[in-house]
Image (cartoon, helix red, strand yellow):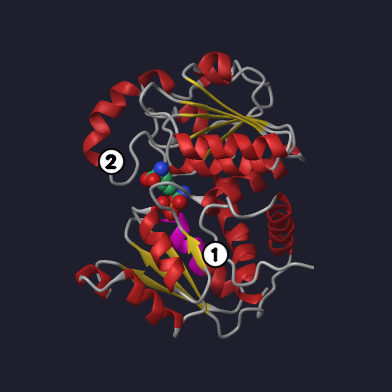
Amino acid sequence: TYSLKDRDVLTWLDFTQSDVSKLLALAQDVKENPYSNILSGKTLGMIFEKSSTRTRVSFEVGMVQLGGHATYLNTRDIQVGRGETIADTAKVLSGYVDAIMYRTSSHEKLQDLAENASIPVINGLCDKYHPCQALADIFTILELKGRLSGVKVVYIGDGNNVSHSLMIICAMMGMDITIVTPEGYEPDETIFNKSQAIAAEHQGAVKWSHDPETSVKEADVIYTDVWASMGQEEEAGERLTAFKAYQVNESLLSKAKEDVSFLHCLPAHREEEVTAEVIDGPHSAVFQQAENRLHVQKAILLSVIHG
Ligand code: CP
Ligand code: NVA
């Protein structure tokens, strides 16, 4: 009889396996049942410092479907863009809305907002983490494979925010994850070490490699993300060269399990990190994965706002 009411969702590092299992079960229930008026009169503030299609629409639609409301706050329009502090913004919004979702370039800013808000704060992507994406990812894997424990996930590409959150949540659920990157693009060492420690507690495994071909052997899931994240636009050219051998294509897929699934958080760049043949082919579950953002986030909103 514990509750996730009033909790911040910033990294999953402060959540237990049973917290995450509870969210997955609720997401399943939410996907099947409407919960139409449960957040009636409640408002989510959504602060965006970066572009978004999935996160923005799924959070807004999620609130509406639960009977509540969401307000979109672009940092170009609100006063933080003109120098009002994050702390003041957090305190002011706490008097109006019931939870805040924040997409920012800096984990420190996210922590600043969370520390100064008296309401739950949800990370809608920062430079280090993308927790809502990771929850949708394992929810999708559970749908596809019927289990999580022991499932072998191979992430190929940049050691970025998406890879970090995937690593943490897979470790927590006793899965087997390998992060495969070019040299110089490995995941954050601290987050990697924390993930390994979490995996050790849950009979999971967290590994890294520079070699896609040997890593994908026996893979149940192959995952990739863009080579240049938002904010890395000037590095796009050099990254294109550095990541060339890390494309997810038919030849790589054929070295995994026959029923391997392909996942990508989207947006995707066809013929860069993944070929059209793979992302639009029979192994791909990327649109199921994108839809699941809605269901898992409704579960998060219900848990932290309603309890
Ligand atoms: N996957 C994801 O977070 O997509 P958006 O950037 O469109 O929100
Ligand atoms: N790693 C990507 C994910 C986008 C959803 C980025 O940060 O831009």
Local SS, label 1: loop
Quadrant of the rendered image containing residue 232: top left
Residue 278 vertical placement versus 305 (above, below): above
Q: Is mark 2 within 8 Å of ligand 2?
A: yes
In front: 48, or 204?
A: 204
Which class describes the residues within 10 Å of circle 1: few (<14), some (14-19), or many (20+)? many
Return the residue at label 2.
Answer: 232
The answer to whether residue 234 of the structure is visible from this angle is: yes
x, y percent for residue 99: 51, 73
Q: Residue at x 49, y 43 (%)?
A: 265
x, y percent for residue 220: 66, 28
Return the residue at label 1.
Answer: 8
Q: Residue at x 39, y 74 (%)?
A: 90
Assess whether residue 59 is covered by the magenta stretch. Answer: yes
- Main SS of the magenta segment? helix
Local SS, label 2: loop
Residue 293 vertical placement versus 187 (above, below): below
Q: Amino acid at mark 2?
A: Gln
> Of the residues under marks 2 and 1, which one precedes in the sequence?
1
Q: Residue at x 54, y 35 (%)?
A: 193
Q: Which residues are magenta?
A: 52-60
Q: Residue at x 55, y 31 (%)?
A: 281
